[in-house]
Image (cartoon, rainbow, N blue to C red):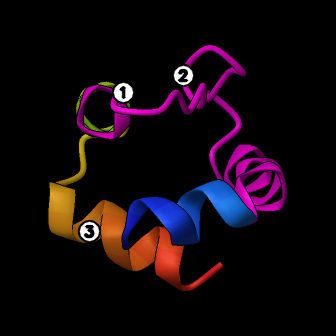
Amino acid sequence: MNTKEVKGNWNEQKGKLKQKFATLTDNDLMFAEGKKEEMLGKLQIKLGKTKEELHKIIAAL
């Protein structure tokens, strides 16, 4: 998952992630330029997933 992939359709992916994981909030999924790793770290903690698992989940959306 690269920054352009995420940035291009992030609103759509964000909605799907919120449907799949009801505990996620807009703040958890706030994607800011240069802050991708920080966002993924928050998601790892909140969902109890590894970075690789998160990449697979997002890629599968």
Q: Are marks 1 and 3 in contact (CB under 8 Å)?
A: no
The answer to whether 47 is drawn above or below residue 35 in the figure is: below
In the image, what residue occupies the spot 35% across and 39% down?
36
Q: Position of residue 11 (x, y in %)?
A: 81, 49
Give, as a single range, the part of the protein colored magenta: 9-38
Q: Position of residue 16 (x, y in %)?
A: 77, 59
Q: Which amino acid, by three-letter code, is at mark 1?
A: Lys
Q: Are marks 1 and 2 in contact (CB under 8 Å)?
A: yes
Label annotation for residue 46: 1
Where does the N terminus fall, quadrant-wise? bottom left
Q: Quadrant of residue 43?
A: top left
Q: Circle 3 — which element? A: helix
Label annotation for residue 53: 3
Looking at the image, is mark 1 or mark 2 earlier in the sequence? 2
Magenta run includes residue 41: no
Q: Position of residue 61 (x, y in %)?
A: 66, 78
From the viewer's side, name the closer residue of 7 and 24.
7
Looking at the image, is mark 3 or mark 2 earlier in the sequence? 2
Q: Are marks 3 and 2 in contact (CB under 8 Å)?
A: no
User: Pointer 2: what residue?
Assistant: 28
Q: State the separation of the CA atoms marked 1 and 3.
A: 13 Å
